[in-house]
Image: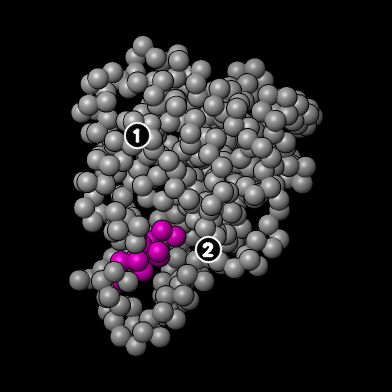
Amino acid sequence: MNTFFGRQLLYDLFQAYYDARKNKRSTINVLAFEIDYESKLFELYEEIKSEKYEISPSICFISFKPTKREIFAAGFRDRIVHHLIYNYINPYFERLFINDTYSCRVGRGTSCGIKRTDRFIRSCSDNYKKDCYILKLDIKGYFMSMDKHILYKKVEETLDRFRETTDFDVDFILRLIRKIIFHDHTKNCRTKGKREDWQGLPKSKSLFYAGENKGLPIGNLTSQLFGNIYLNDFDHFIKNKLFCRYYCRYVDDLVIVYQNKKSTRFLIPILRDYLKRNFLLEIHPNKIYLQHFSKGVAFLGTIIKPYRTYIRNQIKGNFYKKIQYWNKFLSEKRRKLSKDEFGKFLASVNSYLGMMKHYNTYKLRKKMLVKCLLPRFYPYIYTVGNYDKICSKT
């Protein structure tokens, strides 16, 4: 224990700092923290060690892409603590997660989940020769409906199981986790944007309307991990009790592929009752999809159909708007982009190209870069592969 509160905790806190700032060193909050960051980390270390650490107010705003949702962004100091907790407990939960949970996991992102779902459909239909049906469900207001007591109990029970093999003080980390789980992020938060941004947002998607001891903020690393932990028992119930071999989940999106339509339909009330009874969650009544595989299924921004996978129109539209944004940005500048601006341009466009290159989008990528992007960009960039990526010439 003395060793943990000595060098180990301090070393792990520095590692959490490096993880938190990765790919975000140009942001204002990170730049401000980097000024004399060592003394700030020592100060944070003393607060955590003495259990005097307090969570700072979050910034609340509405994100409109890919869908409208309420975000609570933690301060950079708090994000370091989130990474610290994640680095400690995630390896133990990774041993318990099923292979087909795709969120906040190394090597198991959206692209992996889409390819796996496509493979499930191929296998269940014997490469599209036999009938099979796709059941897609959505949990209503998942993050806002999570019960904090149920969540903390699951975390506590799991860490107790591994208590003898952990290299950190379990009770100390549990107290830190409890502080984060039961913290009310709506108190003293700073709102960013206009009041009109919240208009049309369902109450089930807002933390301001979550009940007592309910809801986690979208946007925090710990919330993503807790989202996997909360429904882990549900995943095992589907796989091991209901024997649904072709099942995968991405946060609150569930997909089950089954050969018999009648049997697949019978799963819905079973899953609805299990979620309500054990997790106090509800299946969204307007987002139940059950169709033959030939009809395809919308999953994680794509349309999966036999022999091909398409990007949804919403993603295409967002990519086009991003191209137009940079065209307008360059036109209004009437000068070359600065190094920082050009880096943001490359990252912005490549984020779409990196996702789209995995699917049938060659013509779309070519059109966006050749016909939609202003020719003024061409002297400074070149394309890699079949319009898979753009790079700087300088």
Quadrant containing the N terminus in the rendered view? top left
Residue 111's place in the image compared with 238, above or below, is below
**Within 10 Å of the Cα at label 1, are there few (<14), some (14-19), or many (20+) other Cα atoms?**
some
Residue 8 located within the stretch drawn in magenta = no
Image position of 179 (left or right of 69) = left
Please provide percent x and percent y for residue 20. 33, 46
Image position of 186 (left or right of 291) = left
Residue 346 located within the stretch drawn in magenta = yes
Which stretch appears magenta?
A: 342-352
Residue 169's place in the image compared with 207, above or below, is above
In front of the other: 292 or 192: 192
Question: Considering only order in the chain, which callout, 1 or 2, is on the residue closer to the N terminus?
Answer: 1
Quadrant housing residue 130 = top right
What's the CA distance linking mark 2 and mark 1?
29 Å
Please provide percent x and percent y for residue 323. 45, 72
Image position of 4 (left or right of 139) = left
Can residue 362 be seen from the camera position used here? yes
Residue, disc 1? 48
